Image: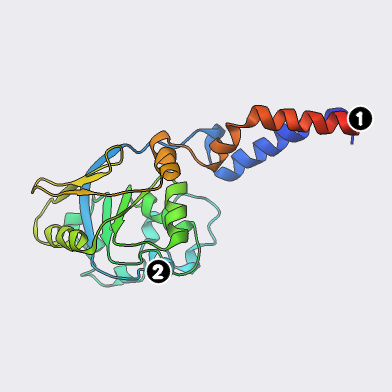
């Protein structure tokens, strides 16, 4: 390989990484600082990824367009919560323990976001789902079961029930006096606040990476 070709290898890898991230022109995601929205109550535990987005829809090659297939099998029941008009514009999903368990599929986060959800609140999350949600700019909020149950009850009985999720202060609030603190690891919090992803983290070290590759070129020349 010529020196010029080797010199281009860093740029090629960088372009490939940005393309693989799914970002147009390498643009970062929208920062998540504070979000207010209607709540959709999903009073179910152990919601797995095959229910969030069934496997037959994973053949799509785009990252968008998964929203209509969210909870596809459950939506066959006309009484399913997301079939109710009062929750049509909900942007905060609240569910039971161990949300997002099952097989690993980033499509679960894509489907939720494409359906309009910016955050999911639950007493606990499956680790891979949590990682995929954060990686796509969606906030998974862990609250105590008692607080989640209170939120679920209010969303089920009070039309138009909404929450404000404040990532900067680490609080979930409502108009009834709820003020529940939550925590998230510092690295994930920073990524969400900045609207950055793994590719952005790599590109922060672009100067050092370029210097390393130049040293390799000098050695091989």
Position in image of residue 216 (x %, y %): 82, 34
Q: Is residue 33 above or below residue 160?
A: above
Q: For the residue labelled by badge 1, is the local secondary structure a helix, a strand or a loop? A: loop
Q: Is residue 16 above or below residue 141?
A: above
Nearest to viewer (mark 1 / mark 2)? 1
Position in image of residue 94 (x %, y %): 26, 58
Q: Is residue 33 above or below residue 120?
A: above
Q: Is residue 110 visible?
A: no
What residue sits right under mark 2 in the picture? 48
Q: Residue at x 27, y 63 (%)?
A: 95
Q: Are marks 1 and 2 in contact (CB under 8 Å)?
A: no
Quadrant assignment for the N terminus? top right
Position in image of residue 91 (x %, y %): 27, 49
- The picture quadrant where one finds residue 83 is bottom left
Q: Residue at x 37, y 57 (%)?
A: 68
Taking depth in this image into account, of 117 and 172 the one nearest to the observer is: 172
Would residue 141 be found to the left or right of residue 148 on screen? right
Q: Which mark is residue 221?
A: 1
Q: Residue at x 38, y 50 (%)?
A: 113
Taking depth in this image into account, of 19 and 211 the one nearest to the observer is: 211
Position in image of residue 21 (x %, y %): 56, 44
- The picture quadrant where one finds residue 20 is top right
Would residue 70 be found to the left or right of residue 161 on screen? right
């Amino acid at each position: 390989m010529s020196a010029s070709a080797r010199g281009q290898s860093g740029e090629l890898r960088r372009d490939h990484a940005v393309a693989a991230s799914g970002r147009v022109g390498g643009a970062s995601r929208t920062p998540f600082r504070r979000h207010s929205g209607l709540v959709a109550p999903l009073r179910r535990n152990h919601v797995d990824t095959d229910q969030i987005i069934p496997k037959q829809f994973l053949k799509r090659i785009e990252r968008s367009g998964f929203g209509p297939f969210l909870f596809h099998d459950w939506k066959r029941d006309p009484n399913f919560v997301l079939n109710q008009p009062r929750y049509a514009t909900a942007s905060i999903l609240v569910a039971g323990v161990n949300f997002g368990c099952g097989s690993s599929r980033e499509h679960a986060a894509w489907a939720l976001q494409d359906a309009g959800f910016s955050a999911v609140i639950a007493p606990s999350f499956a680790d891979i789902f949590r990682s995929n949600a954060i990686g796509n700019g969606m906030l998974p909020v862990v609250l105590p079961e008692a607080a989640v149950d209170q939120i679920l009850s209010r969303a089920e009985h009070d039309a138009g029930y909404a929450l404000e999720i404040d990532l900067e202060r680490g609080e979930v609030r409502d108009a009834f006096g709820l003020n529940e603190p939550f925590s998230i690891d510092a690295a994930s919090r920073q990524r969400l606040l900045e609207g950055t992803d793994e590719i952005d983290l790599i590109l922060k070290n672009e100067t050092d990476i370029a210097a390393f590759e130049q040293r390799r070129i000098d050695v091989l020349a």
